[in-house]
Amino acid sequence: SSSSSSNGGFMTAVGALLEYDTLKTVHIKSKKVGLIFRLLQIIILGYIVGYAIVYQKGYQKFDSGVSTVLTKVKGVGVTCEDLSVNITNITACADKDIRVWDTADYVIPAQENDAFFVVTNSIQTSGQTQSENGWDEDPLRSTKGSQKTFYCENNTVCEENYLEPSRNGAVNGICNTTINRCKVFGWGPVEMKKDDDKSQSLGYARQMPQAEDFTVFIKNIIFFPSFNAVFGNTGLGNNSIAYLTSCTWNRETDPYCPIFVLGDILKEAGVDDFANDAMIAGAVITIHIQYDCNLDINDETCVPTYSFKRIDSPKDPLSEGYNFRFAKYSIGTTPSRDLYKVYGARFVFVVSGTAGQFNFVPLLIAFGSGIGLLSLATVVADLVVTKCLKHAEVYYDYKYQIVNEEDIEESIENEEALHTQSENSPLLPK
């Protein structure tokens, strides 16, 4: 019946729980098995000592660093306010149209946490004001999407969408039938797409090719709380003022110099053609500063390594490179502003570091966990003996023996019977 079957299964499960396995030592005199077993032990011991303890520094206590980065950018850029001038021939720009950019102009914002931005290209919409009569929208902008302008042939559409958000303001209810766009309240004249398109071709007068030669002084400090240790990227190698004011970082010749040329950083990050790429549309570059400090060898200095990578997509159809807008305001009888759309290179710092120092606790943990791995040698050797060797079934029977209580009782009874028989036998000595 089903109930008796269930009871039988339950009793089997209980019986399995109440069984006990004990180790049985079987001494196998086989050179093949012995060789396999010793080789496995040597390999595991090599892993414990060579890799886990020596290579991975399993004898050290480790700590992660807390870091900050300070930067100073130096250099001068020159652009022309006369947009008919080709920037590659800047000397053709009239003196009255020359604009010189210094650090305060092209580093935006002046200070930023673990990053800095340098302008390399810009468009400017000057003298914007707000007017009760509204301003014409840009006829080249799309009439669809979140940044749409409103197409119109008369005032009806504009009146129906009065004060609705448009690309450059709020619809004021009047249609400019010349360009078939609703006028807007807001700052105007509005930024024009035709000017932005010009800025995306090499030679635009407000591009700044000199940015490739700008330098940045990078001062990095990293602190390891567990060891109360502070390191940095300055004070390494030649510390003379003459050297530090004239050197620039080079991976081979000047790895300790904290002054970097932006063009070198861009090339290391994969920007091979600055003028046709990052200068025009901008870029986002990571500067990875890595510390690996062994305090057992040197607790005074720790030399960082640098790596650079471009992380924006230069061919992104939606928004390639990196750009943003900001305004400079003038408060007078009529408040006005100059609107800038700037393109440039944004450099983001990623600082990581570990410091290690000898400590008995991690050494004991590494050694103890490694010793536990030695049991794998026995497991593998047992598998080889009982599954792979010739006559494996014989080895299996020697290795594993099943003993039931009934067998034990029967064995005891047999031994007692033999003992009784020997006592009663007249042929055996007493």
Image (cartoon, rainbow, N blue to C red):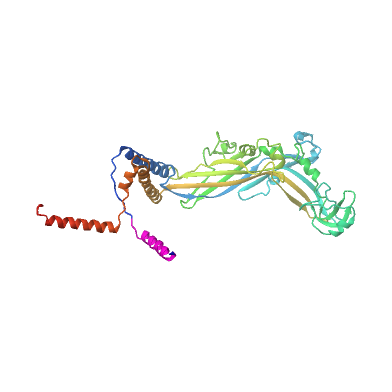
Residue at position x 38%, y 63% from top?
11
Q: Nearer the viewer, residue 149 or 224?
A: 149
Residue 427 lies, in percent from the top left, at 10, 52
Q: Nearer the viewer, residue 117 or 299?
A: 117
Q: Nearer the viewer, residue 84 or 137?
A: 137
Residue at position x 79%, y 56% from top?
165
Q: Residue furthest bottom?
A: 3
Image quarter of the N terminus: bottom left
Residue 229 lies, in percent from the top left, at 48, 49
- Is residue 76 visible from the viewing direction of this image? no
Q: Is residue 192 above or below residue 133?
A: above
Q: Residue furthest front?
A: 1
Image quarter of the C terminus: bottom left
Q: Is residue 172 above or below residue 397?
A: below
Examine the structure image and report whether residue 23 is included in the region drawn in magenta. Answer: no
Where does the magenta region start and end? 2-20
Report the side of 180 relative to 388 (left or right). Answer: right
- Is residue 100 visible from the viewing direction of this image? yes
Q: Is residue 148 above or below residue 213?
A: below
Residue 89 lies, in percent from the top left, at 76, 33
Q: Is residue 175 above or below residue 215?
A: below
Residue 353 lies, in percent from the top left, at 51, 47
Dominant SS type (magenta): helix
Q: Nearer the viewer, residue 82 or 323?
A: 323
Report the side of 362 relative to 83 (left or right). Answer: left
Report the side of 342 relative to 220 (left or right). Answer: right
Name which quarter of the figure residue 321 lies in: top right
Examine the structure image and report whether residue 17 is included in the region drawn in magenta. Answer: yes
Residue at position x 71%, y 42% from top?
281
Image mark count = 0
